[in-house]
Image (cartoon, rainbow, N blue to C red):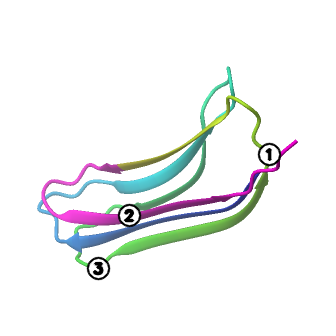
Amino acid sequence: MVEFIECAVWRRTAATTAGSSRGFIQYTPQGMSTVVLLRAEINTLTLGDKDVVTIGQALVLKAGDALEAITEDLATGGNCDYILNVKTTEFDA
């Protein structure tokens, strides 16, 4: 069971050309299409810019379901830091 999701992205060094920098958590139920559960995104060049998003989530996962944490930085130059967290609890049958 998913209880909590957090996504954060910070611009650590200035980029030379603007582009989207994002971190996101996506969910794929077995045999189904993928959906993004939560995304943090910045579209600026400025050092220190950030986006932090958190949600409390009650999502029951079944065998074969998948959660993925993905980062993407389309800016030229510069660096970003990311935090992508999912808190889960497993129940034994």
Up-down relation of residue 77 to residue 52 (above or below): above
The residue under label 3 is 48
- Mark 3 Cα within 10 Å, few/some/many (few <14, many 20+)? few
Residue 89 % position (x, y) = 74, 56
Q: Distance of mark 1 from mark 2, alpha carbons? A: 25 Å
Answer whether labels 3 and 2 touch (C-beta < 8 Å).
no
Q: Report the side of 73 relative to 88 (left or right).
A: left
Q: Is residue 13 left or right of residue 52?
A: left
- Looking at the image, the residue that sits furthest to the top is 31
The residue at the far front in this view is: 92
Instruction: Name which of mark 3 and mark 2 comes first in the sequence.
Output: 3
Residue name at image x 38 percent, y 63 percent: 82
Residue 27 quadrant: top right
Is tag 1's residue or tag 2's residue first in the polypeptide sequence?
A: 1
Which one is nearer the viewer's eye here, 73 or 69?
69
Q: Where's residue 79, x and y in %? A: 21, 64
Q: What is the distance, in whole Å, between disc 3 and disc 2 at their CAs?
A: 13 Å
Res 82 label: 2
Q: Is residue 54 above or below residue 65?
A: below
Tag shown at residue 60: 1
- Looking at the rendered structure, the secondary structure element under dot 3 is loop
3 with respect to 93 (left or right): left
